[in-house]
Every structure is written in structure tokens, then in C-alpha cells.
Amino acid sequence: MKSQTLKDTATALFADNKGLLAMDESNPTCNRRFASLGIPQTVEARRAYRELIVTTPRLGECIGGAILYDETIRQQKRDGTPFIKVLIEAGIVPGIKVDAGAKELAGHLGEKVTEGLDGLRDRLAEYLQMGARFAKWRAVIAIGDGIPSRGSLEANAHALARYAALCQEVGLVPIVEPEVLMDGEHTLEQCYEATDELLRTVFSELFAQRVMLEGMILKPNMVLPGLACTRQETVDEVADATVNCFLRAVPAAVPAIAFLSGGQPAELASARLNAMNARFKSRLPWAVAFSFSRAIQQPALEIWKGQDSNVLAAQQALYHRAYCNQAARAGQYSGAMEKK
Ligand code: 13P
């Protein structure tokens, strides 16, 4: 195992309070977001949008790594420069989503399991050769009546651990992403319980598959009430519940926890990340960071709308969100930073 390489990559991703930019939406997900804004759902529109992102001036000051999708890692700027080269020159480490998506779990109505282990060793070798230095695999867990079941937690955790071990074998840092979804009426306490059980199951499987904790990154959900829950806790209450949950369930050897945003409004995601760092800084054994997609990209996408003339303004919005989240890592974000 390439232990030192893995540790070095994990450190580089989060140096100087930087975090990750997830830009690995699958084509169907990207098309859905484009459709809601009237942007054409074409290969060229997706390429142009990803060019906007990777060429954002000074992005590398706040973003240590970018997670790409198979289509994107093979694409180039309009002038022919590969996106991978653009990122590396900006000081941003390229990563790649390698799971094949979440499919219905047999015998478990309403639950999913992430697929993609078959042939993964060969695909990882190809991505490494292309320049990727880390990878991502996402498992999704819903909360509902009798859900999550033990069977779905174990199936998803096992797949995450098998994926992580294969990544480390070839020298790619695995981002292990177990996500409890925000959809539903569940309370913050129910999210806490589901997240706690999920994390314990994931780390048990990671241990069984001999994954080196120092050479992986955890990408979890924050502990939040469901989107349709009538009681929505304050920023500080969310920060306290989230950090307490992770202090109990995540080993200190893990170098960083990089939260997903999961559909939270962008400014709220920054405020919650900030509160975790501001309130717990001296007690945190791992970096508490971000790996946001929507909470970094959405404002920029809404400005761009597929128009060349909006590229500069969209890039400024993208940089602003990355900058705010870097400040949140240091516990130095405030709502005043949002005043235009
Ligand atoms: P969001 O931040 O939009 O949840 O996306 C993160 C991600 O990478 C989902 O897999």
C-alpha cells in the first residue's frame, strides 16, 4: 500500500483551510439542474459549464481538490487544454466519482444500494494514469417507517469499504460518502440516530477491509432535521448535534471530515460549518471541512443560465462561495460576508 502517498494527498486537499468542490454530478443530475433553469441538456453545455468552473480565477486559493465525473475528466477547454491540466496548474488536485449510482436494494422497499464494484480495479488504474489522485463513492440512506434497515446499512457500508480498499491499493485517496438524506419529516434526533448507526457500521466495515484511516476522507451529511420537519433547529444546535455525533463515531486517525451540503441553502451550509469550527475548534481531532456541490455551485449556475455573457459574474459567485466556506473552516465566516 502506498501509505505515504495517500497521507500526502489527504493533507494537500485540506491545507490552508481549503476544501473540496464536488463537480461530479452524473449526466442525468446535471441535466435536471440545467432543465430547471432552461439551459440546454447537451454535452457541449455541460462542457462549457465545467470550463466555467475550472477556469474560475483564484479558485485554487480556497479549493484543494475537485471531484470530476467520467465525462468531465475526459473533456477539454474550448482551446483544447484538458480540464485535468487546468486544475493541476491552478493547484487543485483532481478526483473522480467512481460509483455507478444507487439502485433499488432487493427485498428492501424504499432503500438503495450503491453499485460499481465489478471492474473497479481496472477503472481506478485508468483514472490514476489520467491524473486523478483521489476518488469518491456515495451511498444514500433514507429515513422512513422502519428505515434504514440493518440490511441496507450493512450492504452499503460493505460496498464503501471494498471500494476504499481498492482505491488505497492503487494509491488513490478514497472519499467515503455515506449520506443520510434530508428528504422527509424526520426530526434532528432521528437523523442523529441514523447517522450514528450508519457511521459505526461504515467504520466497522472499513476496519474489516483493512482500510488505512490516515489515508481516507469521510464525506458525511450534517445532522439535520428533515426538510419537511416542522421543528428546524438553530445553527448552533445543528453544529452541536453534528459534532457530538461525529466525536462519538469517527476515529481520530481520519484526517478530515468534509461535509456534503445535501440541498441546504448555500449560506446556511456555510453558517453551520462555521459554527462547528468556532464552537469546537480545540476539541476536533480531524479537520472539519466541506465537499459541497450545490452549496458552492448553485448560485453560479443560476447566474450563468447557459449564456457566455454571464460567465464572469458566475465565476465571481462561485469564488465567493468557495471563499466563504474557507472562512467557515477557520470559524471566521459571518453573514456580513454575504452583503454584496
Ligand atoms: P451536495 O453538496 O450538493 O450534496 O453534493 C455533494 C456530493 O458530492 C453528492 O454526492
Image (cartoon, helix red, strand yellow):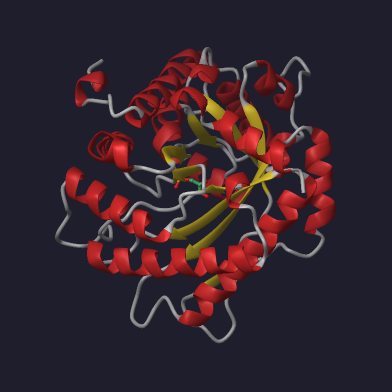
Residue 129's place in the image compared with 215, above or below, is above
Q: Position of residue 92 (x, y in %)?
A: 61, 24
Residue 63 shows in the view? yes
Q: Position of residue 38 (x, y in %)?
A: 48, 37
Furthest residue toward bottom: 107
Total numbered badges shown on the rendered structure = 0
Query: Does residue 45 appear to the left or right of 177 in the view shown?
Result: right
> Which quadrant holds residue 330?
top left
* Residue name at image x 21 percent, y 62 percent: 229
Q: Position of residue 327 (x, y in %)?
A: 34, 24
The foreground one among 304 and 135 is: 135
* Residue name at image x 46 percent, y 50 percent: 252
The foreground one among 29 and 176 is: 176
Residue 202's place in the image compared with 271, above or below, is below
Q: Position of residue 2 (x, y in %)?
A: 76, 43
Query: Does residue 232 appear to the left or right of 263 in the view shown?
Result: left
Residue 7's place in the image compared with 300, above or below, is below
The foreground one among 37 and 199 is: 199
Q: Quadrant of the C terminus?
A: top left
* Residue name at image x 60 percent, y 64 percent: 207
> Which quadrant holds residue 294?
top left
